[in-house]
Image (spheres, rainbow, N blue to C red):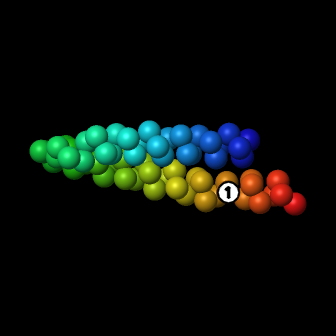
Amino acid sequence: MKLFSLLLSILVFFISLYFFIEKVSDIDTFNDVIYISLLITLMAICITGVIINWDFFSNKKK
């Protein structure tokens, strides 16, 4: 289960990073700013998920 959560966090991080890179160059309205801030929040949640589940690899080595 930890492996699935780790892989899902990494996958969603890269998907949201792709959309962030695509959209960050054409910010025109306040709605775009809200969209970018939601993508940043989602990436922060994914980073937190990776940090929480990172011990999956350290437990495998022991």
Q: Position of residue 51 (x, y in %)?
A: 61, 59
What residue sits 73% from the left and 59% below the top? 55
Comparing 41 with 19, the one in front is: 19
Is 13 displayed left or right of 21 in the figure? Answer: right
Residue that carries the numbered disc 1 in the rendered image:
54
Q: Is residue 39 above or below residue 48?
A: above
Is 4 displayed left or right of 43 in the figure? Answer: right
Is 27 displayed left or right of 59 in the figure? Answer: left
Which amino acid lies under the numbered mark 1 shown in the image of this protein? Trp
What residue sits 43% from the left and 48% below the top? 42
- The local crowd at label 1, few if under 14, some if 14 to 19, many if 20 or more residues have their Cα within 10 Å, is some
**Which quadrant of the figure contains the N terminus?**
top right
Comparing 29 with 20, the one in front is: 20
User: Residue lying furthest left in this view?
Assistant: 28
Per the image, label 1 sits on a secondary structure element best described as loop
**How many labels were placed on the picture?**
1
Q: Position of residue 20 (x, y in %)?
A: 33, 45
**Which quadrant of the figure contains the C terminus?**
bottom right
Q: Position of residue 57 (x, y in %)?
A: 74, 55
